């Protein structure tokens, strides 16, 4: 029986972009760093080739946008740059009308969740707040089910691994599994992992007679009932991993974040860069007047 695998694929319009990958050594380098992020000297030793040849192809691959530097580390006085492919597959899109209206395959969405897709399989944990009283505020999370809606988006980018990818915040903390790629659903009141990383954010949740979202970047604060924060930073428990936070002041704010990333990605992620921390403060709107959030606006 034939099977298909969903893979993160980078579509290019100019076939010249792929030229850098056609050299046999360049192809070996791509496959090597697809297995695990690595730096030129280590790659050269593994492939048993001249280090300068590796540097040459690394430069060409990076210039063509086929690989990127995801972290740096000092070793014996030198800075080692770790590289990975920008996608697990590359393809050429022919000119003409594409009849599919597939918002989930937006290049910005694929870039935003890039670290969570390795070899076509989801690499990380989606962390939701426990539905029982827990944490310093003894709060019951009411927004964990929104992870299902997000799951449809993630499922369009990759396959599932052979273990459960959704976990409660209390289990992640108890099992000390914070040092991996994490997608946090819910704010610091309902999700204790969100609470632990809150002070690492330049736009964070703060208490000032009431909870609000406070920006250290613009010095503004937001307290709208349906307000939410979309953030992406390096995981403070492991700088080689990434952490995405989709969190509201209340559960409707979390719902607004999920709607924003699944239905309005091109607007929300317009200024996203893989090499910088990312923050968006959004507000949920009820356009059709039925009492339910169905749209969003960007506050910051």
Image (cartoon, helix red, strand yellow):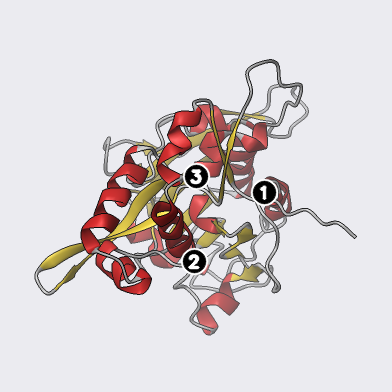
Q: Residue furthest top?
A: 96
For residue 90, above or below residue 295: below
Mark 1 or mark 3, which has the lower sequence index?
3
For residue 77, above or below residue 152: below
Location of mark 3 (residue) = 112
Separation of residues labelled 1 and 3 (CA atoms): 13 Å
Residue at x-position 48% and y-position 81%: 176
What's the mark number on residue 35?
Answer: 2
Q: Quadrant of residue 215?
A: top left
**For the residues bearing labels 1 and 3, Cβ distance under 8 angstroms:** no
Front-most of residues 227 and 95: 95
**For the residues bearing labels 3 and 2, Cβ distance under 8 angstroms:** no
What's the mark number on residue 203?
Answer: none
Front-most of residues 72 and 237: 72
Quadrant assignment for the N terminus: bottom right
For residue 203, above or below residue 41: above
Location of mark 1 (residue) = 150
Front-most of residues 245 and 288: 245
Front-most of residues 104 and 21: 21
Separation of residues labelled 3 and 2 (CA atoms): 20 Å
x and y, in percent, of residue 72 in the image: 25, 61
Residue at x-position 12% and y-position 66%: 78
Residue at x-position 25% and y-position 67%: 41
Mark 3 or mark 2, which has the lower sequence index?
2
- Can residue 288 be seen from the camera position used here? yes
Separation of residues labelled 2 and 1 (CA atoms): 27 Å
x and y, in percent, of residue 156 in the image: 70, 46
Label 3: element kind:
helix
Viewer-side label of 1, 3:
3
Viewer-side label of 3, 2:
2
């Amino acid at each position: 029986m034939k099977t298909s695998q969903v893979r993160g694929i980078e579509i290019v319009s100019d076939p010249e972009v792929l030229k850098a990958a056609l050299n046999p050594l360049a192809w070996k380098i791509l496959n090597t760093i697809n297995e695990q992020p690595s730096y030129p000297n280590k790659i050269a030793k593994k492939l048993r080739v001249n280090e300068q040849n590796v540097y040459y192809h690394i430069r060409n691959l990076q210039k063509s946008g086929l690989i990127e530097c995801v972290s740096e580390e000092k070793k014996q006085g030198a800075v080692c740059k770790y590289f990975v492919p920008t996608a697990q597959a590359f393809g050429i899109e022919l000119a003409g009308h594409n009849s599919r209206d597939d918002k989930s395959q937006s290049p910005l969405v694929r870039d935003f969740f890039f670290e969570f897709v390795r070899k076509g399989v989801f690499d990380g944990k989606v962390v939701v707040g426990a539905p029982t009283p827990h944490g310093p505020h003894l709060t019951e999370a009411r927004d964990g089910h929104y992870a299902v809606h997000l799951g449809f988006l993630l499922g369009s980018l990759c396959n599932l691994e052979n273990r459960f990818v959704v976990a409660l915040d209390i289990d992640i903390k108890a099992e000390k599994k914070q040092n991996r790629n994490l997608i946090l659903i819910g704010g610091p009141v309902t999700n204790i992992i969100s609470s632990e990383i809150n002070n690492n954010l330049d736009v964070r949740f703060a208490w000032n007679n009431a909870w609000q979202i406070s920006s250290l970047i613009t010095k503004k604060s937001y307290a709208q009932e349906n307000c939410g924060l979309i953030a992406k930073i390096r995981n403070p428990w492991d700088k080689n991993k990434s952490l995405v936070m989709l969190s509201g002041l209340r559960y409707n704010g979390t719902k607004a974040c999920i709607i924003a990333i699944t239905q309005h990605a091109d607007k929300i992620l317009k200024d996203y860069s893989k090499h910088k921390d990312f923050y968006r403060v959004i507000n949920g709107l009820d356009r059709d007047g039925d009492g339910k959030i169905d749209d969003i606006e960007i506050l910051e």
